[in-house]
Image (cartoon, rainbow, N blue to C red):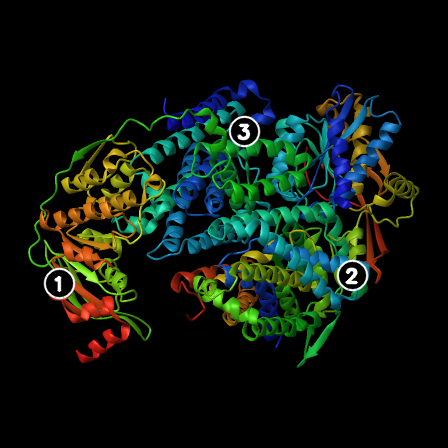
């Protein structure tokens, strides 16, 4: 058995036994407590999906849980209880919180939204919902909430199995999803949102949709809770309840799914026994535990409980590499055209009137001293919103104000200066995410085959990462990480490849082999590569064209020999700044 | 006139309550969610001091010192390991808030404590009788604001602090001990928080949860203001006045959430908020 | 200090809870250890414990000792559900006697119905809450509002009233009744405003009071924090209006001191009541709790009475069988610190003596008027 399987199967089995055997083993009080705990666990799953997996810290899931509960309370109180009204309330409890969550998603996630901002919005949502409930007068019951409405007349055992089934279905479905190829995208967003955007993934749409689904699920859990308990109170929508969910998830292990499920159930049960007799001490213990876990064990407790149980073993069944069919790759005309591109911050011009063209098969070296604007130039190609003047065309199409994920779809791939990868994902998972825009990943399955273009397979073979498909990206050597990022960028099947100092920190032999790869990419596969480099010797060997950037302007561009032998370049690279400035003046 | 005084005093009180949070957020980009609990500590300092019989004028210094010490402990043991994880810092400080509140409960009990207001009665301002204590909050806010601005602009510590705010790496390379600056700013921020708790007690009751009600509004005001104290004063004035207007003319409940909603909307439209850079 | 006291109480309850169940009668007392009612919890627990000590000293009920099981209801609906679930299904108590928020009571009633045990709701509330397992021995607005409005009109010639409340069942219920009563009496309500339970800034409402220029203010906030903040802010606003507070108790008034000076309060119990039962009760309280003694109040004394009503009912029924006890509760009569308490078997509420009192500058309370044997009006029909 493999490690990942053990760590899921034990908790899953525990939950299954608990759900099946509960009513035979426990007294009414315990059963009662567990039913509520199961509904809370569903809400905790949504927090874990959003925070543990996707990295979006949310205090707001209580708002959706509470909204769902109020759907039950309001319908049953004001319209009455019948099977039709129950169905209506059930549907409303999914639709209303779902729509509310989509709206919150729209508010929270947009291009360039800081994670902090999203977190702030998630804080405001429960406060607003809470206040709305309070100001609802007799309609919502204000501070007292709604009580005494008629609801489903099930025996307590039936409620127990219904609640348990809801929790198990939610947990297993989520488990399948997070392990699927598509589910890995959530982790990718958490690890490195920028890289996701430059792989063509629209992260804010993904997060908004995810929040919508999580809102709907939490709403349904709230509905069930309200229908079971017969009490719908404002505190169910409030910010404190939202933070309580975070405490459950954090203590038991964010990003482990079964951790929060078990953790929520355990904490709810313990607190139902302790909070009656020692409410303050219990709160204090929870608080201290929470702070210590956040500071010392950010992964929560579950991984430490599970670890001794799982044998060390290799990863799941090996992934098979395959060659992918490449779509028609011919580009007519220029691959990239920059026309009088300018970038300024206020009165400070970082780039001035940059005009250059690149064709398929070109390998353009962009050189210049620190602060010349090389990285800014790359950013102006990759992100339509970055430049302040001029125009850029990629494969004949205008860049306009397009965001990176749209620019990628025009045929541009950008490799960053530091290896910009998904730290916790394996090599094959990183590559599969890079293929998302070419091949829609499954929401339920983990594919055993990974199809990549021939040149990506080449790069992997030359650098040896094809032997390390199962290794987590963070465990690769620096050179291998660079190779992985390059492979990911190329897996997009781009026409224009931006390479920002790809050889930084590599050994001499690594550098040589990567140089050969670049040459092959340009000459054999007809990419248009733009290569930012400090190392003039390296550029000299492989480039077909060189652009010299200095203080935000193009000092010179032309053939390799022409540029390398010019006095100007010699001055910049060997002389002082003043001499360069003089020559600029002369020019 | 009553309305103008409502505006001015609400602004002043909001500024007093938020300044400590701002000090911390401005320098470290970390939101201290224990601020609510720290306000409560200030309230209990006021309570203890009036019991012991120290004139309440000196009380605010005791409050500041108590907060400074608590802040120093929090910074050293909880916040420092989390500089690289600002979202976790939010959570840890929130958890810490729970702990502080429970400790208060264990020492002083759950109940409401009462503190005599040092200034009873009303003053007549241009024909309107108005609570004198609320009016006193205006010069108090101006003093706090003045001292902070003088501290940041007129002292070596201030210059170093601003250097850390602008560019921490550069500041470090210039030999500024940014860890020390953070440590001191956090402690001062916590001290300002307890002082604020001390000042608001005569307006409300002293109970362990007294600060929590202020927390989100304070938090949102600070978010909107970026890292400028002048922007914070502006935000307090604008949002505080809107809160008063909505509370009086629409509904006190909506007034209560006016600050949060408007601040969130402002951030969505102008992510940088009120600060101009 | 206070917390330590609760701990001792709770720890004692927890220890005794573990003793063998058959020999004892367990009485559940859910209180708001946390939340808005936490101010009152210590006095409520003391009342319950005093009653239990006294009853046990005289041989218990039907030869069995009684034990008090305290649970925290968090002063709200969700907490009350937990507390009642725990008391009825886990601790398996024989009866529940509690003085809680209306939200807590409403949330708990379905659980009481399922648990099928006697429940004495021992405090004032907004009225018209009925359950076949429940009896009430506190005041309802029919009894209180008439006394308060009548007094303010008689003493201060007040005809225009401004009503302020906490926005929850109790606040709204009482003030709605008060409003109807004022209008029926031919007076005027110039405004009524509500703030959520957890709000502490009354500035906007005080501004409205100033604009509306009433003759008197009547407030009905939740006991505890809102009472204190409203009182303080009214005081410091400079408004010098007659102020009747329907939810202020003596001990809170005492701790507010000058901030409550002049406030008119009303209730069925004042510590200064000059009856032998009250004197004996106060002496026993001080004797048992010594320096930890909490001022008895409108929430705690009815709990004390409730224990004696339950004892009387069990003895009349000759059993602790829930059905029989519920029937007997409507037939027995006891005399406690508040006077004679007899709950009606059909209406489920009690006729009560109402006392009006004014807070003095030092926070002490002086009885200024009283109305005997006020009827609760039609509440329930069983």
**Within 10 Å of the Cα at label 2, are there few (<14), some (14-19), or many (20+) other Cα atoms?**
some
A312, B30: nearer the viewer: A312
Q: Picture coordinates of residue A237 (x, y %)?
A: 51, 46
Q: Residue at x 20, y 61 (%)?
A: A366
Q: Chain of mark 3?
A: A
Q: CA distance from mark 3 to mark 2?
A: 48 Å
Q: CA distance from mark 3 to mark 1?
A: 67 Å
Per the image, the residue denoted by label 1 is: A357
Above or below, C23 relative to C142:
above
Per the image, the residue denoted by label 2 is: B50
Q: Nearer the viewer, mark 3 or mark 1?
A: 1
Q: Residue at x 56, y 67 (%)?
A: B244
**Within 10 Å of the Cα at label 1, are there few (<14), some (14-19), or many (20+) other Cα atoms?**
some
Q: Quadrant of residue C125?
A: top right
Q: Chain of mark 1?
A: A
| Relative horizontal placement of residue A319, taking residue C227 as reference (left or right) | left
Are the residues under badges 2 and 1 in a single subunit? no
Per the image, the residue denoted by label 3 is: A34
Residue at the front extreme, as displayed: A574
Do residues under tags 2 and 1 come within 8 Å of each other at their CB atoms? Answer: no
User: SS at mark 3?
Assistant: helix
């Amino acid at each position: 058995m493999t490690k990942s399987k053990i760590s899921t199967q034990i908790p899953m089995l525990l939950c299954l036994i608990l759900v099946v055997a509960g009513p035979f083993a426990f007294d009414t009080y315990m059963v009662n407590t567990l039913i509520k705990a199961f509904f809370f666990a569903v809400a905790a799953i949504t927090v874990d999906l959003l925070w543990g997996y996707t990295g979006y810290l949310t205090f707001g899931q209580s708002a959706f849980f509470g909204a769902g509960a109020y759907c039950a309370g309001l319908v049953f109180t004001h319209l009455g209880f019948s099977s039709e009204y129950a169905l209506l309330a059930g549907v409303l409890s999914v639709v209303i919180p779902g729509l509310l969550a989509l709206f919150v998603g729209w508010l929270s996630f947009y291009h360039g939204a800081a994670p902090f901002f999203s977190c702030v919005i998630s804080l405001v949502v429960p406060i607003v919902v809470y206040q709305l409930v309070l100001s609802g007068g007799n309609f919502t019951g204000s501070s007292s909430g709604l009580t005494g409405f008629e609801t489903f007349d099930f025996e307590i055992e039936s409620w127990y199995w219904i609640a348990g089934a809801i929790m198990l279905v939610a947990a297993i479905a989520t488990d399948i999803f997070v392990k699927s190829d598509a589910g890995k995208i959530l982790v990718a967003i958490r690890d490195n949102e920028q890289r996701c955007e430059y792989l063509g993934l629209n992260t804010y749409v993904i997060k908004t949709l995810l929040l919508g689904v999580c809102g709907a699920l939490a709403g349904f859990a709230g509905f069930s809770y309200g229908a079971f308990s017969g009490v719908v109170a404002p505190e169910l929508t409030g910010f404190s309840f939202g933070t309580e969910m975070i405490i459950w998830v954090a203590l038991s292990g964010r990003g482990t799914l079964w951790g929060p499920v078990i953790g929520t159930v355990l904490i709810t049960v313990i607190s139902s026994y302790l909070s009656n007799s020692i409410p303050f001490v219990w709160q204090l213990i929870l608080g201290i535990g929470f702070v210590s876990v956040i500071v010392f064990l950010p992964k929560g407790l579950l991984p430490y409980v599970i670890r001794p149980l799982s044998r060390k073993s290799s990863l799941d069944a090996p992934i098979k590499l395959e060659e992918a069919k490449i779509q028609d790759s011919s580009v007519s005309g220029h691959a990239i055209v920059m026309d009088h591109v300018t970038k300024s911050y206020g009165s400070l011009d970082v780039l001035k009137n940059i005009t250059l063209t690149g064709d398929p098969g070109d390998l353009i070296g962009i050189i210049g001293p620190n602060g010349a604007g090389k990285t800014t130039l790359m950013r102006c190609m990759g992100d339509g919103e970055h430049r302040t003047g001029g125009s850029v065309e990629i494969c004949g199409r205008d860049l306009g104000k397009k965001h990176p994920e749209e620019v990628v779809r025009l045929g541009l791939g950008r490799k960053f200066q530091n290896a910009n990868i998904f730290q916790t994902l394996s090599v094959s998972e990183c590559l599969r995410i890079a293929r998302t825009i070419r091949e829609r990943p499954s929401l339920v399955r983990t594919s055993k085959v990974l199809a990549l273009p021939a040149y990506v397979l080449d790069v992997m073979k030359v650098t040896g990462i094809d032997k390390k498909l199962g290794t987590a990206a963070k465990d690769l050597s620096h050179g291998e990480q660079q190779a992985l990022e390059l492979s990911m960028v190329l897996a997009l099947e781009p026409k224009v490849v931006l390479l920002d100092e790809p050889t930084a920190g590599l050994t001499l032999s690594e550098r040589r082999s990567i140089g050969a790869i670049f040459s092959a990419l340009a000459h054999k596969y007809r990419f248009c590569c733009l290569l930012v480099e400090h190392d003039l010797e390296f550029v000299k060997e492989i480039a077909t064209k060189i652009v010299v950037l200095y203080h935000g302007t193009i000092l010179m561009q032309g053939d390799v020999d022409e540029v390398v032998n010019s006095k100007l370049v010699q001055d910049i690279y060997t002389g002082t700044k003043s001499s360069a400035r003089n020559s600029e003046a002369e020019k | 006139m009553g309305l103008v005084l409502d505006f001015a005093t609400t602004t002043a009180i909001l500024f007093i309550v938020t300044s400590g949070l701002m000090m911390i957020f401005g320098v470290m980009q970390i939101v201290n969610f224990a601020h609510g609990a720290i306000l409560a500590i200030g309230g209990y300092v006021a309570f203890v001091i009036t019991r012991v019989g120290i004139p309440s004028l000196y009380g605010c210094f005791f409050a500041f010192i108590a907060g400074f010490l608590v802040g120093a402990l929090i910074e050293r043991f909880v916040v420092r390991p989390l500089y690289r994880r600002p979202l976790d810092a939010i959570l840890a400080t929130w958890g810490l808030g729970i702990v502080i509140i429970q400790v208060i409960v264990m020492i002083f009990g759950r109940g409401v404590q009462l503190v005599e207001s040092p200034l009873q009665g009303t003053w007549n301002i241009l024909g309107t009788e108005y609570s004198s204590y609320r009016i006193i909050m205006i010069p108090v806010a101006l003093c706090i604001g003045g001292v902070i601005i003088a501290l940041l602009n007129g002292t070596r510590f201030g210059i170093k602090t601003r250097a850390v705010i602008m560019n921490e790496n550069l500041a470090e390379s210039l030999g500024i001990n940014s860890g020390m600056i953070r440590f001191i700013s956090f402690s001062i921020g916590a001290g300002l928080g307890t002082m604020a708790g001390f000042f608001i007690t005569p307006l409300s009751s002293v109970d362990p949860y007294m600060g929590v009600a202020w927390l989100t509004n304070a938090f949102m005001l600070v978010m909107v203001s970026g890292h400028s104290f002048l922007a914070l004063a502006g935000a307090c004035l604008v949002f505080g006045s809107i809160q008063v207007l909505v509370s009086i003319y629409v509904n006190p409940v909506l007034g209560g959430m006016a600050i949060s909603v408007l601040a969130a909307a402002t951030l969505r439209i102008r992510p940088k908020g009120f600060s101009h850079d | 200090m206070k917390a330590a006291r609760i701990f001792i109480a709770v720890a004692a309850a927890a220890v005794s809870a573990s003793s063998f169940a058959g020999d004892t009668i367990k009485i559940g007392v859910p209180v708001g250890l946390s939340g808005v009612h936490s101010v009152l919890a210590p006095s409520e627990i003391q009342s319950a414990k005093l009653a239990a000590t006294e009853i046990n000293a005289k041989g218990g009920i039907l030869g069995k000792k009684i034990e008090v099981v305290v649970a925290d209801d968090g002063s709200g609906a969700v907490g009350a559900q937990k507390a009642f679930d725990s008391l009825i299904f886990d601790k398996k108590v024989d009866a529940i006697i509690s003085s809680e928020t209306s939200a807590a009571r409403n949330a708990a009633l379905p659980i009481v119905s399922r648990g099928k045990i006697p429940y004495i709701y021992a405090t004032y509330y907004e009225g018209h809450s009925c359950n076949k397992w429940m009896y009430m021995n506190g005041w309802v607005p029919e009894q209180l509002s008439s006394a308060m409005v009548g007094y303010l009109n008689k003493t201060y010639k007040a005809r225009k009233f401004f009503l302020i409340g906490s926005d929850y069942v109790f606040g709204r219920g009482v003030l709605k009744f008060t409003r109807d009563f004022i209008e029926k009496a031919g007076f005027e309500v110039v405004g009524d405003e509500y703030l959520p339970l957890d709000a502490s800034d009354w500035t906007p409402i005080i501004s409205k009071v100033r604009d509306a220029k009433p003759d008197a203010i009547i407030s009905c906030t939740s006991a505890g924090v809102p009472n204190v903040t409203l009182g303080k802010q009214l005081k410091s606003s400079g408004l010098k209006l007659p102020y009747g507070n329907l939810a202020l108790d003596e001990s809170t008034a005492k701790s507010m001191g000058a901030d409550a000076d002049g406030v008119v309060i009303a209730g069925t119990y004042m510590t200064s009541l000059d009856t032998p039962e009250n004197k004996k009760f106060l002496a026993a309280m001080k004797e048992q709790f010594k320096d930890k003694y909490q001022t008895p109040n409108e929430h705690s004394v009815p709990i004390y009475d409730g224990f004696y009503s339950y004892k009387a009912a069990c003895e009349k029924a000759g059993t602790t069988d829930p059905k029989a006890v519920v029937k007997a509760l409507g037939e027995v009569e006891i005399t406690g610190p508040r006077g004679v308490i007899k709950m009606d078997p059909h209406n489920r509420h009690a006729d009560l003596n109402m006392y009006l009192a004014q807070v003095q500058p030092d926070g002490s309370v002086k009885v200024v008027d009283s109305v005997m044997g006020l009827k609760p009006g039609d509440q329930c029909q069983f």
